[in-house]
Image: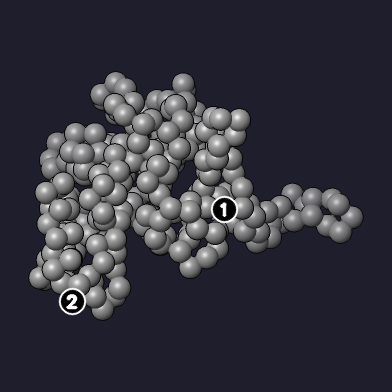
């Protein structure tokens, strides 16, 4: 896959219409990707540079996972990578977006952690995890550069929007009489939540959940493309 657009993958990028790179890129390689794209008549925005959300929780012996910015990238610092790519003029592709639900125990409110990554809200006070570094995820500027700061808005359900909070799309079956059957479930996509949508209300930015999702380019089931 590679970490940047080069002569080795430009034909694939043109044939596919866009390309998702690996997540070990740098500011310099991102700039090279943009320059190479322009030289070859390819829209730089269609270069989706990967960001490994799990990199912030990479510890232990052996080779550690890393993503931009090297020391604090991924996790709550995911928006920092998105901001840098937006500055360069490239797109972003988020690897392993289920990180909040996989890394944090239930008492840490993983959904609140995810909202913090996307909206810049403070992390929950109950935050705890298995990382050996205290306050590892309270990274500098994580609240100033949330993912949504550099994302675009598209209608939920459109060709440019896909999001999942990893909850199964099932609801409890309710009889016509109004009685719920305890052990019977039915498919119900409305049980899935949409992305938090920041709106201006009374002069302050608040987070609402509504009928519109916020993304940039495309979402796929395994990764989020912004």
Image point 45% across, 37% down: which residue? 119
Label 1 SS = strand
Residue nearest the viewer, comparing 46 with 66: 46
Place of residue 87 in the rendered image (x, y in percent of width and height, measured from the top left): 26, 47
Residue at coordinates 29% horizontally, 75% vertically from top-left? 16
Q: Is residue 98 left or right of residue 92?
A: right
Pointer 2 residue: 11
- The quarter of the picture where the C terminus appears is bottom left
Tell me if residue 109 comes above or below residue 48 in the rendering.
Answer: above
Label at residue 212:
1
**Above or below 150: residue 40:** below
For this view, does 93 lie left or right of residue 32? right
Q: Residues within 10 Å of mark 2 (few under 14, many from 20)?
A: few
Task: Using the image as rendered, state which of residue 187 and residue 46 is in the foreground.
Answer: 46
Residue sitting farthest toward the front: 203
Q: How is the image coloured?
A: one colour
Residue 50 visible: no
**Distance CA(mark 2)–CA(mark 1):** 35 Å
Image label count = 2
Residue 58 lies, in percent from the top left, at 23, 38
Above or below, comparing residue 186 to residue 180 in the picture = below
- From the top left corner, tell me how far across and down residue 82 is, in percent: 31, 46
């Amino acid at each position: 896959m590679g970490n940047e657009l080069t002569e080795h993958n430009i034909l694939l990028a043109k044939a596919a219409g866009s390309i998702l790179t690996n997540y070990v890129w740098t500011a310099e390689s991102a700039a090279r990707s943009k320059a190479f794209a322009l030289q070859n008549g390819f829209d730089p925005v269609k270069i989706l540079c990967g960001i490994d959300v799990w990199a912030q929780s990479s510890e232990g012996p052996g080779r550690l996972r890393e993503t931009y910015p090297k020391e604090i990238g991924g996790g709550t610092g995911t928006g920092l990578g998105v901001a840098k790519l937006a500055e360069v003029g490239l797109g972003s592709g988020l690897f392993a977006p289920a990180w909040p639900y996989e890394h944090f125990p239930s008492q840490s409110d993983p959904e609140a952690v995810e909202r913090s990554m996307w909206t810049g809200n403070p992390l929950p006070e109950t935050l705890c995890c298995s990382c050996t570094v205290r306050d590892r995820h309270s990274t500098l500027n994580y609240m100033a550069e949330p993912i949504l700061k550099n994302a675009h808005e598209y209608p939920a359900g459109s060709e440019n929007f896909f999001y999942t909070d990893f909850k199964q799309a099932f609801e409890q079956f309710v009889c016509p009489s109004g009685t719920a059957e305890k052990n019977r479930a039915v498919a119900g996509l409305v049980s899935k939540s949409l992305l938090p949508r920041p709106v201006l209300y009374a002069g302050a930015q608040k987070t609402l959940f509504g009928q519109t999702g916020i993304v940039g380019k495309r979402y796929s089931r395994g990764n989020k493309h912004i």
